[in-house]
Amino acid sequence: MSMQAGVSPAPDLGTLHEFHGVQPVLPVSDVTRAARWFRDVLGFELDFIAGEPPSYARVKKGDRSYGDPVYLRLWQCNAREATPWRGEIVIHVGKDIDGLHAAYVKRGVVVIEPPVSQPWGLREFAIREPDGHVLRFCGYLP
């Protein structure tokens, strides 16, 4: 990008406004079932569930004692799109990525990629949750 003489650069809005987190929204077929699955199977906490009947929820894991919490929002959609989910959410884990993988296998989680050490310094594995979304869990290599 070229700069014209005498023109100051645009302000860094992310710093100015203190961007500090991302909360992905996952479309799900049944928000109550999805929230329960994230809680009971993956170990998240139910942060809130809204609507009558419920149509929107947020699950979280973490309390800032070891980094920022992870939040996922669950949005109930009555009809799923014909095109499959093409993205994934990456969740950083502070320790024992292989132990987490083993715990999820014992709980019947669908693992689509087993743990592997990547050349970019992370060990990671991927799962598919019941609505088809891919969640990749990763931790830094020692």
Image (spheres, rainbow, N blue to C red):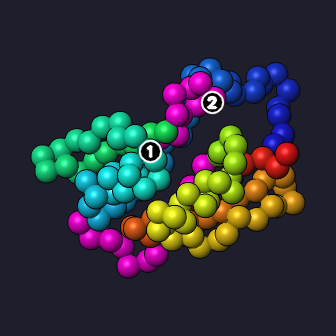
Q: Label 1 is placed on what type of residue?
A: Phe
Q: From the viewer's perspective, tell me whether residue 38 is left or right of residue 136.
A: left
Which residue lies at the image location 85% right of the left edge and 45% below the top edge?
142
Q: Nearer the viewer, mark 2 or mark 1?
A: 1
Indicate left or right for 98 with 79 as reference.
Answer: right
Query: What residue is shown at x 32% (from left), y 52% (from top)?
Result: 36
Q: Check the image and report above or below for 16 versus 37.
A: above
**Secondary structure under badge 2?**
loop
> Mark 2 or 1 closer to N-term?
1
Identified by mark 2, the residue type is Gly
Residue, disc 2: 67
* Number of the label disc, if any, that sits on residue 44: 1
Q: Is residue 109 above or below residue 25?
A: below
Looking at the rendered structure, the number of numbered marks drawn on it comes to 2
Question: Which residue lies at the image location 33% right of the left edge and 51% below the top edge?
Answer: 35
The answer to whether 26 appears left or right of 100 in the picture is left
Residue 51: image x %, image y %?
18, 44
In this rendered view, identify the residue nearer to me: 79 or 110.
Answer: 110
Asked which quadrant contains residue 116, the reply is bottom right
Q: Which residues are magenta?
A: 62-91
Q: Quadrant of the N terminus?
A: top right
Image location of residue 87, percent across then percent down: 55, 64
Magenta stretch holds residue 85: yes
